[in-house]
Image (cartoon, rainbow, N blue to C red):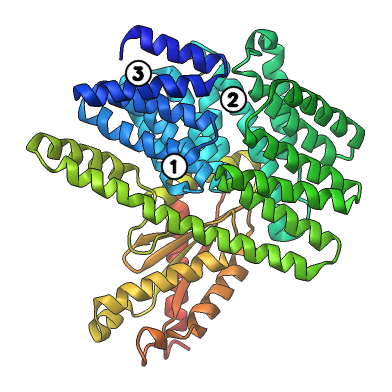
Amino acid sequence: MSTDDEEHLALALRQEDPAVARDMALSVMALAIEKGNLHLEGRARALLAECFILLADYRSAHEHSIRAIQLLQSVRDMSGESKALSILSSAASALGSNDQAIEAALLGLELARIGGSADRQSELQVQLGLALLHARCFDASTDALRQARALEPASSTALNALCSLVVEGTCEVVRVITIRHETGEMPSLDGLHQAMRRYDDFAARHDMVALAQPDQRPIQVNWNLVASAAHCWSGELSRAERELETVRRWMDEEGIAPWMESLEALVRCELAMARADWPAAQRAASRMIGLAESTGREQSALLGHVLACHVFERQGKWEAAARELKQLAARERRIRASTLASRGAVVAWQLEMRRSEDSRRELQASAAQLERLTLEDPLTGIANRRCFEQSAQQSLRESQSAGRPLCVALIDVDCFKQVNDRHGHLVGDKVLQVVAALLVEHVRADDLAARWAGDEFVILFRRTELSQARDICSRLRVAVAGHDWSGIESTLTLTISVGVAESQPGDTLKRLVDRSDQAMYEHKAATKPGSR
């Protein structure tokens, strides 16, 4: 793509005219295809995908960003590929494909580090934080956003640091709503208030007027909505209303993307609930779901169902709340099915790349990168050891810094070798998959269940005291022992041994895991037949 083409496209995007930029990118892409110029086609598709993001056409953005990545990788344009990966992460997040969004952001971040681009690293750290937010990995999201801000001195712009603060505030809003939904109680607002103080500190150190350019204004309007939610939950309803009206005036004057309308509907729902205006709260939740459905932004639709459920629960309308929960579960199933279907495009690309020796080497290099960065155990579908160790290291540091409790449980399937010997490895694999599913079912949203190795699993309990972690593990042991295993093998019965350890001052992850491992073997010995 020529310098003039890129400058014109960038100008159209800066002027908030993505439709014009889209048409320009389509023309360039058609020319590239006609001439067989893979590099030009890849750059054009990446820009086209970015335009579709701004136009809230996330499925088109997803499709074009995947193809752009394939093309740019084939011509070894690492910078272009990392940008396309950032766009893919954004589109996948909106569509609810959380795993793909996280993988894309991680791979793009690695390429940006190799290329030495601080601006791109900062951009991708923000995108990773957003992807982790949508996956409800709140602590990991906050950590990624802090790393984005740490890159500010090396970056040529403060915009990414501002974005990280706004996404962190949004993360805290979603965290509050999620925990309230799961526990039925309003959680602490400390994290949200800390995010607001960090924003105020940033504003004191930067020229916010200079940052309020047309293409950057939605970022600050997003912050107004975060602040409005905070004021609402703190009981400052008039102040929350003023923030909302400021946002509404700007949206009416300038026009805004549907995702911003969805966020405004969320805050209006919270304000209406605070005033016990249940019809207004129901309308706002329904509006949020409708706006999300019109653009395919599944994350907003899921959150809308959570809000609607809470509105009905507050009124004691339990049947209506149950209907919302069923719709939420059905939508989550559709997202999973859609995510699996989208993997077909990746398979097609892999087959295409195998057609020549050079392309095969490209595929192997990409596969090696993805293997290093993957976070999922392929057999069970839960987190793998690498994902656990990354999350646990960070959580341990945070718990020690904040003086919060943290526990680790190591789990072993009793006599698993006998299962394989008597029934075969296919049965053994199914057993591990069911155990993994039971783990996920019994841990809380903020905990992390992972496959450690072989027939061993591990659970990270964040902000959890030893007695509470032991209670959860006790329920898990009962669930495994009481599970109907006859669906796998008629004579099969199964138990697990669990060891739990709580972190101590100065602990390393290895010492903590070793103590839980020792506790697990002590439990196994104590429950062995004839041990008493």
Task: Quote the CA–CA distance across marks 2 and 3.
Answer: 21 Å
Write the residue at 48% across / 26% down: 51
Compare marks 2 and 3 and give the one earlier in the sequence: 3
Is residue 113 something that shows in the picture? no
Q: Nearer the viewer, residue 238 or 6?
A: 6
Which secondary structure, mark 1? helix
Q: Secondary structure at mark 3?
A: loop
Residue drawn at (73%, 51%) of the image:
286
State the SS at label 2.
helix
Residue 213 pos. (x, y %): 63, 12
Where residue 415 sits: x, y (%)? 34, 80
Query: Is residue 24 in sight in this rendering?
Result: yes
> Is 40 placed left or right of 199 in the picture?
left
The amino acid type, in three-letter code, at marker 3 is: Gly
Amino acid type, residue under disc 2 in the picture: Cys
Disc 1 + disc 2, Cβ < 8 Å: no
The residue lying toward the viewer, choosing from 98 and 429, is 98
Residue 250 to residue 240: above or below: above
Against 206, residue 455 (above or below) is below
Q: Earlier in the sequence, mark 1 or mark 3?
A: 1
Circle 2 crowding by C-alpha within 10 Å: few under 14, some 14–19, many from 20: many
Residue topped by disc 2: 163
Q: Quadrant of the N terminus?
A: top left
Kindly identify the amino acid type of the residue bearing the numbered disc 1.
Ile
Query: Within 10 Å of the Cα at label 1, are there few (<14), some (14-19), or many (20+) other Cα atoms?
Result: many
Answer above or below: position of 473 versus 237.
Answer: below
Residue 522, x across and y down, in percent: 45, 73
Pointers 1 and 3 in contact (C-beta within 8 Å): no
Q: Which mark is residue 102?
A: 1
Which mark, by number, is residue 116? Answer: 3
Kindly identify the residue that appears in the image at 64 percent across and 35 percent down: 258
